[in-house]
Image (tube, grey):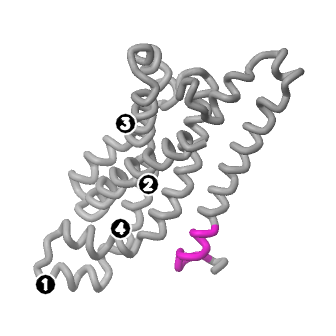
C-alpha cells in the first residue's frame, strides 16, 4: 500500500537525519557533549512507541483528519526510532576519528563540523544505508501494528494494518478468509524482501563484510 510505504519512507528519512547529526557530533567531539547526547539518546530509546502512540491517538485522534493522522504517525516514528542509528554512527566515528586523513584535515584548519560531515561521514555511509533500509521495514511493520490495533491509519485509506483490523471478526476469519490471508502474506513478504535488500546492501558495500 502507498500509505504504508510512504509512512515508512518518511519516518526513516526523519530518523536518519537526526541519527546522523546526533551520532556524528557525539562521536567526534566526545567529552561532555557526548555524555549529554548519549543520555538524551537513552531517554528517547526508553520510550515505548506503541503505548505512546496509542495514548496520543486516543487523546487527539478524533480531532484529526486521516491525512493528519498519517503525518502524526510519520513524525512520531521518525522522532522515536533514531537512537539505534545514532549509536552506530557514533561507534564508527569513534573508531576512525584518529586516522591519518582526519588528522590531516584537522591540521589544515578545517572546522570540526566540516571534518565530521564532509570527511568522516562519507566513510561510514554503508552503515547508514544498511541501517536505514532495515529501519524502513521496521517502520512499516510498526505502522501495520498500530493500524491493526485501531490507532493508526483509518479507513477509507487502505493499509495492510487496517485491512487486517477490518477482518478482525470470527465470522470474517472463517467465511471470508481472503480478506486477511492475502493482506498478511503480502505484508510479511514485503518486510522480508526489504530486510533481504538490507542484508544484500551490507554484503555489497561494507568493506569489512566477510562475505564480500
Q: Residue shown at 32%/81% (left/top)?
A: 99
Circle 3 residues within 10 Å: few <14, some 14–19, many ≥20: few
Query: Which region shows up in magenta?
Result: 200-209
Q: Which residue is mark 2?
A: 85
Which of the 4 quarters of the picture holds residue 117? bottom left
Circle 2 residues within 10 Å: few <14, some 14–19, many ≥20: many
Closer to viewer: mark 4 or mark 2: 2
Image position, residue 17 (x, y; %): 34, 54
Residue 36 is one of the magenta-drawn residues: no
Q: Is residue 206 above or below residue 42?
A: below
Circle 1 residues within 10 Å: few <14, some 14–19, many ≥20: few
Q: CA distance from mark 4 to mark 2?
A: 12 Å
Q: Residue shown at 39%/15% (left/top)?
A: 63
Q: Quadrant of the C terminus?
A: bottom right
Q: Which residue is mark 1?
A: 108
Image position, residue 98 (x, y; %): 30, 77
Q: Which residue is mark 4?
A: 93
Image position, residue 143 (x, y; %): 55, 35
Q: Check if mark 2's residue and mark 3's residue have beta carbons within 8 Å.
A: no
Amino acid at each position: 500500500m502507498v500509505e504504508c510505504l510512504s509512512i515508512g519512507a518518511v519516518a526513516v528519512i526523519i530518523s536518519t537525519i537526526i541519527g546522523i547529526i546526533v551520532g556524528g557530533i557525539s562521536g567526534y567531539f566526545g567529552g561532555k557533549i557526548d555524555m549529554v547526547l548519549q543520555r538524551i539518546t537513552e531517554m528517547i530509546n526508553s520510550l515505548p512507541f506503541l503505548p505512546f502512540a496509542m495514548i496520543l491517538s486516543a487523546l487527539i485522534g478524533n480531532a484529526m483528519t486521516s491525512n493528519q493522522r498519517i503525518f502524526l504517525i510519520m513524525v512520531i516514528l521518525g522522532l522515536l526510532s533514531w537512537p539505534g542509528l545514532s549509536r552506530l554512527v557514533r561507534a564508527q566515528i569513534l573508531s576512525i576519528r584518529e586516522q591519518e586523513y582526519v588528522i590531516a584535515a584537522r591540521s589544515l584548519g578545517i572546522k570540526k563540523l566540516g571534518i565530521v560531515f564532509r570527511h568522516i561521514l562519507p566513510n561510514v555511509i554503508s552503515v547508514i544505508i544498511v541501517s536505514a533500509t532495515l529501519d524502513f521495514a521496521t517502520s512499516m511493520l510498526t505502522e501495520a501494528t498500530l493500524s491493526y490495533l485501531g490507532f493508526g491509519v483509518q479507513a477509507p485509506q487502505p493499509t495492510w494494518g487496517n485491512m487486517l483490523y477490518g477482518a478482525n471478526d470470527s465470522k470474517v476469519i472463517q467465511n471470508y478468509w481472503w480478506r486477511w490471508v492475502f493482506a498478511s502474506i503480502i505484508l510479511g513478504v514485503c518486510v522480508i524482501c526489504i530486510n533481504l535488500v538490507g542484508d544484500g546492501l551490507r554484503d555489497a558495500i561494507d568493506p569489512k563484510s566477510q562475505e564480500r
